[in-house]
Image: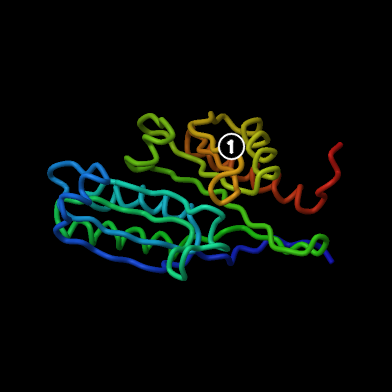
Amino acid sequence: MAIEVQHTLKPEPLAMRLIPNVHAGIAAAFDLKPHEKSIAMITATIDDPLYIGGDEATKKADVRVAFCRSHYAGGGYPSGPLSGEALLILAAPNPAEATAGLNAVCELLDTMRYSTVDLENPKGTLAWLAYTIARPGTYLSGEANAGPGMSIAYLAAPPLEGVYAVERALKAADVVVGAFTKPPSETNYMGALLTGTQSACRAACRAFEEAVFAVATSPTAFQ
């Protein structure tokens, strides 16, 4: 049976809270700026959409990503049923902006899908993400050192597949490495933020997808 790529794996929000007037002790712990009086928190079943969602929120509301970090070992080994793979904290000057930012994150999660293939030998599901951010917000622009007008190819996959696919993406498109997460990340994946024009980032994402799929279909064919 031929292996087919599916696009049905969807991140789901697990827990959310808004703190309208955050205590000074928490504000200091997360290095909030003096005007940032409110925070919004969210966890989700997959970590990458929270990083991308936090960036999206900076475009839709007066918020800043105060904290976003993946949890060790990923969603398969959470510290609790609502922990998920990461925690995102948005800082805002007031509850209305914090709420608008949280809504933007939820909207992004609702539209995002991962690529997956089901393998028989060894049996399991391989999942990866190749996502073009045409107009990055302040958060990922800073993380990727993306200049004005630049787009970002957000890439994530298991270690070998990811390193191989990022190398193929760099050869296939006029993009540069803005940030690189060596394997293993907290969730035992790897990732990269590649920057370039929107068309170049889309080409990089296509090359990344094709390369991960090539490993999935012929994992030991190294020549």
- At 57% from the left and 58% from the top, the residue drawn is 114
- Count of numbered labels shown in the rendering: 1
Image quarter in which the C terminus is found = top right
Question: Compared to 169, does 56 lie above or below?
Answer: below
x, y percentage for residue 153?
51, 41
> Of residues 84 and 48, which is closer to you in this image?
84
- At 27% from the left and 56% from the top, the residue drawn is 101
Instruction: From the viewer's perspective, tell me whether residue 207 is left or right of residue 130.
Output: right
Q: Quadrant of residue 184?
A: top right
x, y percentage for residue 118?
73, 64
**Amino acid type at mark 1:** Lys
> Of residues 94 and 24, which is closer to you in this image?
24
- At 53% from the left and 61% from the top, the residue drawn is 75
Neighbor class of circle 1 (other Cα within 10 Å; few <14, some 14-19, many 20+) is: some
Indicate the colouring scheme. rainbow
x, y percentage for residue 182?
58, 37
x, y percentage for residue 10?
52, 65
Q: Residue furthest bottom?
A: 81
SS type, badge 1: loop
Question: Compared to 30, does 103 lie above or below?
Answer: below
Image quarter in which the N terminus is found = bottom right
Can you identify the residue that label 1 sits on?
A: 182
